[in-house]
Amino acid sequence: MVLAFSLARAQTEYSIEIRGYTWDHSTITVRILPQQNMTWWKPEYLNASLQGISQWNDAMQEFAQNNPSFSFLSDVRFVPTISYEVVSGFNVYMGWIAECASEEVIGQTETTVKFPCHSMNSTVCLSAKAPSGHVMTEVDMQNIVVHELGHVIGLSHTNISRDVMYPTVYYQETVKPLSTLDMYGVAKLFELATTGACPEEDLVIMPQSIGYSQLEIAPENVPSQNLTEYAIRILSRPEVFIIVVTLLIVVVAFLARQRKKLT
């Protein structure tokens, strides 16, 4: 009975790793550096970064409103500025490179921490293309931006595969929502920051009273696409293209055999 109870409890626990530091102020300024002179640059990447930032701001507001004990989270905001040159004085610098070195690192965040556990500045590097040849769409880029901003604010990863803070990226056609688990992790980090204390644990377990759910994304933060664009995105993916070509070859071969039988 004890074993059964332990397994049942483990299955209902939602946890997220934290990095042990966050910001000692609630307004986090972000300098976005578009690479408009590069041949691989897409204007949609700038949209994705702004929509990802807005997605975070909305999620923190919603979580604070629904959980009065964490109402202070409503004061935490990312404030973006677009610039074509690096200017000092910002908390976060977000930029892009043509291609990442590894399929596992299509986004990377490096943070400088001051004693005892406060972030000084962060650099977010985003890749336009993966080594597999996959070129990031606006949806891909927004998912990567949202994930990396989680690292900026002090989160690490969760083992919930449908969560945006899951360590493995799956290219998909929809933007991943942030979750109550992500917000709870951020709330606990800022709760400690207000007291001047540093996290003693590297794992935050969300209480069952809150419950895991994904937070709604505002329509203006969802990349627009019509049916034609959607179809092109699907067919342009290398893995899908190979399947389609293979099926066409099979169909052509089958029809050729049928024609021979008739003659």
Image (cartoon, grey):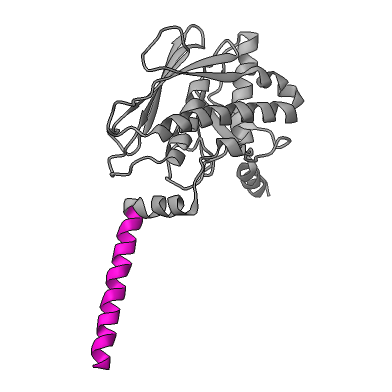
Residue 233 is left or right of residue 23, and the answer is: left
Q: Position of residue 71 (x, y in %)?
A: 72, 21
Residue 106 is left or right of residue 89, and the answer is: left
Identify the residue shown where x is 34% and y is 34%.
128
Q: Position of residue 260 (x, y in %)?
A: 23, 88
Judge by depth and name the residue closer to the eye, 212 or 205: 212
247 up-or-down from 126: above or below: below
Instruction: Tell me the magenta residue range.
Output: 239-263
Residue 164 is left or right of residue 213, and the answer is: left
Q: Is residue 91 magenta?
A: no
Q: Position of residue 218 (x, y in %)?
A: 62, 37
Task: Classify residue 200 by image quadrant.
Answer: top right
Query: Please, what is the dominant secondary structure of the magenta stretch?
Result: helix
Q: Position of residue 109 (x, y in %)?
A: 41, 23
Identify the residue shown where x is 26% and y is 91%.
261
Judge by depth and name the residue closer to the eye, 70 or 61: 61
